[in-house]
Amino acid sequence: MKFTRGITSLQPEGAFVVLAKAKALEAEGKEVIHLEIGQPDFPTPAHIVAGAKAALDERWTHGYTPSLGVMPLRECLAKELRESRGVDWGPENIVVAPGAKPVIMAVVQALVEPGSKVLYPDPGFPSYHSLAAFVGAKGVGIPLVEKDCFAFDLEVLERELPGTSLLILNSPQNPTGGVLGREILGRIAEMAVRHDVSVLSDEVYSRIIYDGTHHSIASFPGMKERTVLVDGLSKTYAMTGWRVGYGAGPKALIDKLGLYLNNNTSCVNGVAQASAIVAIEGTQEPSQMMFEEFKARRSLIVDGLNDIDGLSCVLPRGAFYAFPNISQTGKSGKAISDHMLDCGVALLPGDDFGPAGEGYIRLSYANSQENISRALGILKEELPKVSSGG
């Protein structure tokens, strides 16, 4: 078979590659502490599981659901977004998908022509540059600046915006834990309006922000008409396996995304959608408990990393990732990642997230404090033994 240029250009997400290697080691009987994968280690809250059981009894599995999502969930999401983001969206502005990734892919395919330009954060979520390559676009990473708590380099952004089809934002960020505050978002919004650029705002970590308040670029003047907000239930409600994500934006685009998903995934299964309604409308106490635990883990892992010779780690303001600078060690991120996996700790090299990630590693603190402490101890002991190559 002769493969297309697009499918040949796709790259695997590093976290899943390392996860597969870690699972293979576990199958051989070796213990591995998982700090590579970005999924909460908590069980899905009991009331959400109960909602799924009720949906099964109510035959939510019988028949296809609308490709845009069931109307009760779209109404629920529109209400939540109006309250949390201050944007006047209705259910006609919402599309539901099996996770946030399908929405991101649909938006890229809907708005980006081959040969046009896509901007995204560097380091950033690997799917951004992979999808830009898939549609034959010119992908340009905009550096995130560590000394500015991993905010965009606005001079580079301003220089690259002319002629851009799509600007991708992510706040709170994966992998850095950085957050784009109101002031910087306002400056980005002004640039996007002036250069007539569409924006995809990936806000899947919006409820995991430790310092300050989450702001969406969609709430700024002139941005509602040119922004697609992407979010999901995986991180906030420990529902990674349930696969419920959504997009919000101009109705004309949402209708196109619904048509795309109709031809791709058909629909999201009804039980997951019913459970999503329970998650959003029900008690938020389990999510708050998870948040408080993430906050405690953040302090534990950042303090521990900064106590290791050669490492320095800024305090992440959101999400559940630490992104320490390893440049003083003289080791590459890949060499550290490979060595640590052999020692039973799975973590990721920073350049898995783009060229600007070289000189860093990423550790997810979506694991217990006990395991984080053990992993830090192993890292402190093993780091001097890592080969300078790799």
Image (cartoon, helix red, strand yellow):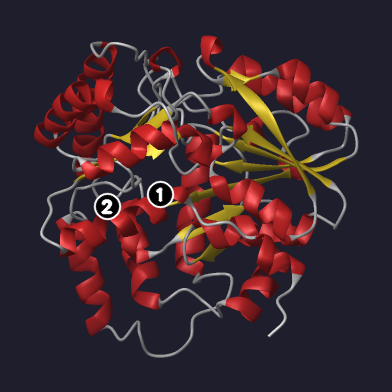
Mark 2 or 1 closer to N-term? 1
> Can residue 300 be seen?
yes
Viewer-proximal residue among 244 and 385 = 385
Identify whether 239 is placed above or below 255: above
**Label 2: how many residues lie within 10 Å, few (<14), some (14-19) or many (20+)?**
few
Tell me the number on the disc at residue 282: 2
Q: Residue at x 69, y 57 (%)?
A: 107
Q: CA distance from mark 2 to mark 1?
A: 32 Å
- Element marked by disc 2: loop
Amino acid carrying label 1: it is Ala
Quadrant of the snapshot with the C terminus: top left
- Element marked by disc 1: helix
Identify whether 347 is placed above or below 16: above
Residue 141 occupies quadrant: top right
Give the x, y percent position of residue 173: 49, 33
Q: Residue at x 72, y 54 (%)?
A: 133
Compared across the picture, whether 90 is left or right of 5 comes to left
Give the x, y percent position of residue 369: 13, 31
Residue 372 occupies quadrant: top left
Amino acid carrying label 2: it is Gly
